[in-house]
Amino acid sequence: MVKIPTMKTVLIIVCVFVLTQISAQTILRGPYLQTPNENSIIIKWRTDVATDSKVTYGTDVNNLTETTVLPGSRTDHTIQLTGLDDYRSYFYSVGNTTNMLTTPSSDYSFKTNPIPGTKIPIRAWAIGDFGKGNTQQVEVKQSYVNYTDTTHTDVWFWLGDNAYADGKDHEYDEKVFAVAGFSDIFSKQPFWPTPGNHDYNEVWEQSTLLGIPYSNIPFSQHEGPYYEIVDVPEQGEAGGVPSDYELFYSFDYGNVHFLSLNSEVYDFTQTYDGINQMKAWIEQDLIQNEQTFTVAYFHQPPYSKGSHDSDDIYERVMIAMREKVIPLLEEYDIDLVVCGHSHVFERSHLIHGHYGNSGSFDPSTMLKDGSNGNFTQGNAYVKDDEPSTADGTVYVVCGNSGSKTSSSTLDHPIMHYSAGGDTEVGSFVMDIYRNRLDGKYLHASGQILDEFTIVKQDMKVELEDISVCTGDNVILSPLISGGSDDLSYNWSTLGSTNASVTVSSQDIGTHTLIITDNVSGQVENLTFEITQGTNMSLSFSNDTLWATGNNGYQWYLDGVIISGETNDYIIPTVAGDYTVSALDSTCQSNSYSYEPLGIEAYAFKDFAIYPNPSKGEVNISLNETELPAGYEITDVSGKTVRNGRLTKKQTVLDLSSLPSGTYMITVSQQQKSQTLKIVLNN
């Protein structure tokens, strides 16, 4: 006799099966990090079994106190963590609501971005044409890890052709995410990608000719593994203007603005529809950009004599980027353009206005600085901070982070340094701090084979004329924005080289301050005047304080301006120290300490108002035997602004809605009446 299992037994079997599957869940890809900003980040991973998604995280690796869960079942997991603190390190673990799949450690960590515009040291790392899963790819990555050591990598950007040969999903796994010696970086280092033509072999699968799309496909139809894998800020989540597509985007890190462009939006029929749409976005993005440095990166370079020759007629994408996009970038005086595609390393001089083939390069008009750009040799490329000024751009090709070629001429006239060949693989490193950008070619051997520096003369200095009171000493310090933190000061007429100087009325006259930025070489020469301040004095008679002087008046109580009191006299009603100054200087008079008469002299025994001056709330104190009483508040014109009854010994009035100024509070009871002055500093 066959025994038929009960429904309960079936459910138990199903539950055991499901739990077994969940407990056996394995991570196939990642976890990896996307789109960090100052208060959020995206964490993605792939598993072999579909479950819900869970991330635990916190600032203490031993105590992950926060949790984010995404219900539902999936194998490709994406969770965004929000509400994070800016520029802070976090640790995390990924899994599901039943089982966590990673153990918290420094290998599973990230650092949020600083607030855009913050001037902090920044390290950026670029690799191009790397995704071949070969030993060179691993060597390039390891050489960078050794080089950067304990210095945190703030921005890691990909220059396209990220997974060979066709950007297929399994190629991203086999040649990028799962490559031994390369894959360990993903769980702790976000990357900012751009696609290349090999990545687009899947995007343009039905529409390619020689690797170039022969028809213009709408942006919404750009689909494929690349776009499924990455999660970039199409809505300006990390700074910049929303592009509405993952095809191209921008972001800020510190005081650097990055644009990830897409050279693959070109089509063989040369409608330029895609490029023109991208250009419209670029212009809107750069109009609002206020960061110190601007860096653009994309796959196919406008200039190269490597494995791809930008002069060859069939290099239609390279030509289109040079002719259509580069003029717009240079219109906004972009500082640096970094590309891949050509399997070599090339770095240009500082140039501007070269949009044709290599034979059309005219050094007399297009070469802004033909030096090697080496800072230590005194040859840094110097620019101002005005986008409207054509100071020049440096162009870098780094398509050899896993690929290499030995069949290139490497003789483009704009290039200062070029390297190719069977052993020539490496990456590009940038260090930015305040107004200095250093670029370096890091060979896989660990050697720096080329380096250059761009400095911005962006220092702005303000120093106003000042009046000095007799007998006073005043410290003068210029207000400085921009520039480096290596400045020299020369108060030439005051005999000081400090950042600030102390002056007195003995220094009355015209003076000069010379400030030199020792990084950019910028020199600012300021002339300022020290004048004699109007000295004031005051006296007390007939319950009134009187000021002497003839340049206008401003009265103070305990060092705080009494709003509206600008006459040459004041009748004190509030206890404290009174002073007066002239309107044309900060010279304070002698101080007069005022104490009201004793309680027995008032019509009301315990009538008091405090605090006075007040920032909104006022306490009125009365003797219990004199309650109830009425009160009336009037402004300086005598207009009643508030009235009511007092029924308690202590009454709190909220006067925060009244404008700042001087008011009179009168308390009345039958035949008794008393008025006190109150100052509001709302």
Image (cartoon, rainbow, N blue to C red):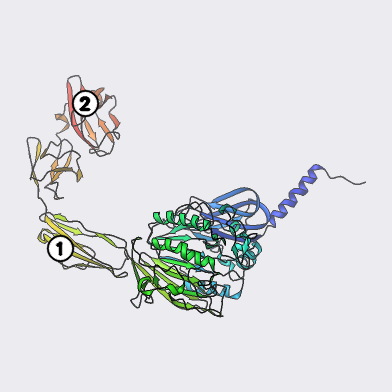
**Viewed as shown, does residue 452 lie left or right of 68?**
left
Residue marked by disc 1: 511
Q: Residues within 10 Å of mark 2 (few under 14, many from 20)?
A: many
Q: Amino acid at mark 1?
A: His
Where on the picture, by quarter, is residue 476?
Answer: bottom left
Q: Nearer the viewer, residue 423 or 565?
A: 423
The Cα atoms of the two marked residues, 2 and 1, are separated by 57 Å
Q: Nearer the viewer, residue 24 or 454?
A: 454
Q: Amino acid at mark 2?
A: Val
> Residue 96: horizontal and vertical position, in percent?
63, 52
Instruction: Please give the name of the residue rendered at 42% of the width and 63% of the height, measured from the top-left corner.
Output: 327
> Residue 458: horizontal and vertical position, in percent?
31, 63
Instruction: Please give the name of the residue rendered at 56% of the width and 77% of the height, measured from the top-left corner.
Output: 405
**Viewed as shown, does residue 279 lie left or right of 511?**
right
The residue sitting at the top extreme is 670
Q: Secondary structure at mark 2?
A: strand
Would you say residue 199 is visible in this rendering? no
Q: Give the mark, 2 or 1, whose residue is nearer the N terminus.
A: 1
Q: Are marks 2 and 1 in contact (CB under 8 Å)?
A: no
Relative to 165, residue 66 above or below: above
The label shown at residue 667 is 2
Q: Secondary structure at mark 1?
A: strand
Q: Residues within 10 Å of mark 1 (few under 14, many from 20)?
A: some
